[in-house]
């Protein structure tokens, strides 16, 4: 296989071309887009979607979906906030409890999918509704409203804010720490997929699970680990959201699960599993960040953003299919 053909077979190629075209487009039509501050704001917006999208992309490569990924972000923040506010305990204790709850949800999703054989789409759709109702119901029961209390005066706030929601200045622009965490998680995921045995397992269980099982790949363990990774990074972004804004709306997160999936698909991940990579997912999330803010910088009606996402999803599926067939030939 020649080098140009190998490049065509890369999952992220279409996304890179699209990202470059969108970047140039907004440079032309939106003068506010051209500043360094705007670029780092785009990176921040991309990171808040891209962190969870990394795990969702790995899960999709492994042949599964998690429709609860959006609301688990809010659940993570609410568990931390409500537990510590109501009992008056250190926020670090609440953060650890929140992590355990999220991992428990991820394990339950994976266990039920593998134990029952029911498609992950249905299992996690059920989890989505349970978490959505619990977020609203428990918050209303504890606080009397649908928003969590302000946690900025509880012990441990400054420490956890520094880890999850701090920022610093570089050359006069603000850089949020989530951008650095995003780069770290993308790099780790890319290394796992390309350089480790578990990475081979992920591709194997997504492309041909029965064949993978026949050659000794731990299919059940691999898929449960992928669900756990989605819950972990959902918890991470939940911590960022809580410590960035000090309070949460219990109804937030609904619909974000589709943004994670779109970022993965635009980045070259196939819905059928077994194909994709972490770099492509990151590029897909960057396209999301550029578009969501570029429309605002251009002064257009932001309602067009959802229409753009739909068009990008359809084009990405068609381009990925065409490039894959061309690369195979």
Image (cartoon, rainbow, N blue to C red):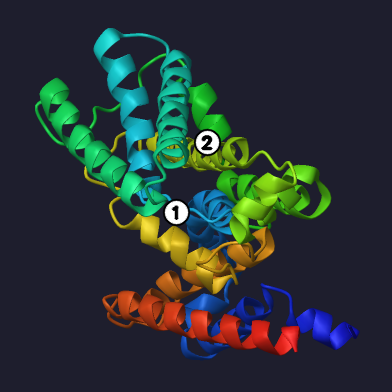
Reading the image, the residue beneath label 1 is 65
Q: Decide if residue 47 is on the left or right side of residue 123.
A: right
Q: Decide if residue 5 is on the left or right side of residue 276.
A: right
82 over 200 or under it: above or below: above
Mark 2, Cα crowd under 10 Å, few <14 / some 14-19 / many 20+, is many
263 over 125 or under it: above or below: below
**Spot occupied by residue 187 in the image (x, y as percentages of width and height):** 73, 51
Q: Decide if residue 130 is on the left or right side of residue 167.
A: left
**Spot occupied by residue 198 in the image (x, y as percentages of width and height):** 73, 43
Do we see residue 215 in this rendering? yes
Which residue is at a point 90% across and 86% down the rendered structure image?
2
Q: Which mark is residue 228?
A: 2
Do we see residue 250 in this rendering? no
Mark 2 or 1, nearer chain start: 1
User: What's the distance in space between the residues labelled 2 and 1, CA to CA?
Assistant: 12 Å
Q: If the image is split into quadrants, where does the C terminus sit?
A: bottom right
In front of the other: 203 or 242: 203
Which residue is at a point 29% across and 45% down the rendered structure image?
128
- Answer with the quarter of the image where residue 297 lies: bottom left
* Residue at the extreme front of the image, as rendered: 214
Whether pointer 2 and pointer 1 mark residues with C-beta atoms closer than 8 Å, the reply is: no
Indicate the secondary structure of the residue bearing disc 2: helix
């Amino acid at each position: 296989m020649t080098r140009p053909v190998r490049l065509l077979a890369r999952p992220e190629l279409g996304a890179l071309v699209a990202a470059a075209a969108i970047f140039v487009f907004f440079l032309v039509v939106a003068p506010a887009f051209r500043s360094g501050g705007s670029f780092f704001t785009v990176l921040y917006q991309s990171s808040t979607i891209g962190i969870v999208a990394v795990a969702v992309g790995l899960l999709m490569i492994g042949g599964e979906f998690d429709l609860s990924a959006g609301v688990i972000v809010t659940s993570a923040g609410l568990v931390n906030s409500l537990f510590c506010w109501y009992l008056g305990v250190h926020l670090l204790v609440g953060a650890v409890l929140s992590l355990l709850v999220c991992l428990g949800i991820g394990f339950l999703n994976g266990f039920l999918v593998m134990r029952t054989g029911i498609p992950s789409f249905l299992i996690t759709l059920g989890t989505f509704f349970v978490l959505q109702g619990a977020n609203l119901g428990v918050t209303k029961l504890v606080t009397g409203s649908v928003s969590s209390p302000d946690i900025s005066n509880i012990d441990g706030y400054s420490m956890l804010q520094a880890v999850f929601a701090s920022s610093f200045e570089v050359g006069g622009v603000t850089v949020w720490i989530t951008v650095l965490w995003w780069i770290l998680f993308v790099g780790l995921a890319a290394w796992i997929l390309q350089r480790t045995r578990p990475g081979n397992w992920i591709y194997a269980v997504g492309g041909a699970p029965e064949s993978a099982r026949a050659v000794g790949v731990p299919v059940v363990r691999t898929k449960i680990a992928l669900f756990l990774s989605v819950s972990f990074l959902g918890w991470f972004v939940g911590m960022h959201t809580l410590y960035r804004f000090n309070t949460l709306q219990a109804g937030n997160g609904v619909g974000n699960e589709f943004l994670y999936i779109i970022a993965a698909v635009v980045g070259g991940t196939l819905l059928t599993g077994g194909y994709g990579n972490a770099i492509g997912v990151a590029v897909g999330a960057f396209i999301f960040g550029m578009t969501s803010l570029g429309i605002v910088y251009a002064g257009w009606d932001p309602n067009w953003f959802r229409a753009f996402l739909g068009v990008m999803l359809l084009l990405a599926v068609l381009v990925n299919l065409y490039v894959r067939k061309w690369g195979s030939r």
